């Protein structure tokens, strides 16, 4: 899987996703999970691909 690594803050990711920094913190601390639409945006932001290359 090709992946871009980004060294960003919670606030930078939150700003990009138009959510609060606290929401990102809750995900990182396993308090809550992002919804499906937000997961898609996160995957695009980090250039992740869900398809397995055979």
Image (tube, grey):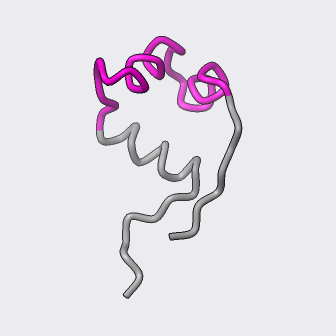
Establish if 1 lies above or below 35. below
Establish if 49 lies above or below 35. below
Q: Inspect the magenta stretch and tell me whether residue 17 lies in it.
A: yes
Across the whole image, how many numbered discs are drawn on residues? 0
At x 50%, y 59%, the residue is 48
At x 30%, y 34%, the residue is 35
User: In which quadrant of the rendered image does the C terminus lie?
Assistant: bottom left
Residue 31 x/y as whole percent: 29, 18
Q: Is 46 displayed left or right of 49 in the figure?
A: right
Q: Nearer the viewer, residue 31 or 43?
A: 31
At x 66%, y 50%, the residue is 5
Residue 10 x/y as whole percent: 59, 22
Residue 33 x/y as whole percent: 30, 29
Establish if 17 lies above or below 4. above
Q: Which residues are magenta?
A: 9-35
Q: Is 21 displayed left or right of 34 in the figure?
A: right
At x 43%, y 26%, the residue is 28
Q: Nearer the viewer, residue 2 or 17?
A: 2
Residue 37 x/y as whole percent: 35, 41
Q: Is 2 displayed left or right of 27 in the figure?
A: right
């Amino acid at each position: 899987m090709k992946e871009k690594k980004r060294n960003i803050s919670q606030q930078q990711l939150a700003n990009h996703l138009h959510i609060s920094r606290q929401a990102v913190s809750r995900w990182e601390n396993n308090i809550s999970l992002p919804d499906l639409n937000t997961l898609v945006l996160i995957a695009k932001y980090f250039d992740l691909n869900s398809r397995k290359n055979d």
